[in-house]
Image (cartoon, rainbow, N blue to C red):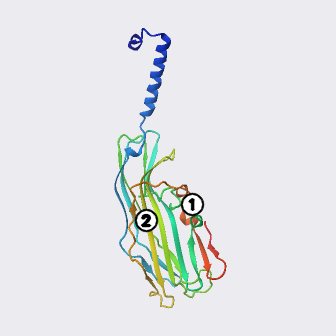
Amino acid sequence: MCILARYHSLPSSLVLLILLVACTMGCIQSIACKPRIRRENIVVYEVSASIDQCPTIIEENSPIVLRYKTPYFRASAGVVMPPVPRNETWVVGWIQACTQMEFYNTYGDIGMSSWELPELRECRVKAISDSDGVSYPWYGNTTETVTLTGPTSKPSRLTVSMNDNFYPSVTWAVPISNSNTPMLTHITRDQSFITWLVAMNSVTKERIVLQTVRWRMRVDIAVDPDMPLGSRASLVGRPYQEQPHILNYQEPIPPNALGRPNANDAQVLMWRPRRGAPLVVIPPK
C-alpha cells in the first residue's frame, strides 16, 4: 500500500516495472550475501618450515646395501577458517610436489644407476605429485589435513603439520650384475620441492592457496668399496641442509601436482654404463 501510494501519480505500467526491478535487485543482493569462503576471510598464523639441523646418517649394517637417512623437513601452520555454509565441506592441508631430482649412484668407471622422473627430466611437466599415493592431492591424511563439514556456526581454529625425509637403500654391487663385489664409489642426490598450504572445497574442487614453501635436500657421499664394511662411506660437502624458504607470494599449483602418478610411482631406476646403451632396471609402477 505504501509503495503504491508513493507512486500513485505514475502510470501503472511504470509502477509495475519499478516493482519488478526492485524485486530483481533484492534477489541479486540475497545471492551476493550468501556466505562464501574467501581468502580474505581465512587467517593463517604461526607458519613454520625447517629442516632439522643434523647431518645425514649413513648406515653400513648390510653386506648388500648402504642406507642413509636425511634430516627431516617439517612444516606447520595454524589456520582460522570462517563458518562453513550448509552442504559444503572444506579440507585444509598440505600439498607437495617434486620439481627437480638428480639421484646418481656411481660405480667407479663401470657406470652409474640413476633414479629418474622421465616427465620431469624431459621438461614435459613442471612438477610431480609427492602425495602418499592414497590421499591425492594431499601429502597425507593424518596430521597433514583437517576436514570441516558445514554448517558450522562460528570460525574454526586448526593446525596442520607434515614432515618428509629420505631413507633409501643403495646396492654396494652394480645393480645389474650377478656379483656381490662392492663397486659403489659415490652417491649424489639433489631434489627440490614446493609445498603448499591449501584450503579446498571437496565438492567443487575450488582451491585457495594460503602459503607456499620451497625447499631442497642434497646428499653427497663418498664411498671406498675396498674398505671393510662399516667404514666405507663418508659425507662430503656441506653437513647441514639449506633452510626452506617461506615465500611472500603464492605460486600456482601445476595440474600434475594434484593427481596420479605420484613421484614414487613415476620414478624409474636406470643403469647408465660408461660404454653402451642405458638400461631400465626398475620401470615405473
> On the rendered structure, is 235 left or right of 129?
left
Which residue lies most toward the top here? Answer: 9
The N terminus appears in which quarter of the rendering? top left
Q: Amino acid at mark 1?
A: Val
CB-based contact (under 8 Å), mark 1 and mark 2: no
- The residue drawn where x is 52% and y is 69% is 101
The residue identified by callout 2 is 215
Name the residue located 45 percent from the left edge and 59 percent from the top edge: 195
**Residue 37 placed where, x, y %?**
42, 43
User: Where's residue 264, x and y in %?
Assistant: 54, 66
Please tell me whether mark 2 sits on a helix, a strand or a loop.
strand
Farthest residue to the right: give it: 277
Quadrant (top left, top right, bottom left, bottom right) of the C terminus: bottom right
Going from N to C along the chain, the mark reached first, 1 or 2, is 1
Q: Which mark is residue 125?
A: 1
Along the line of sight, the residue nearer the viewer: 162 or 110: 110
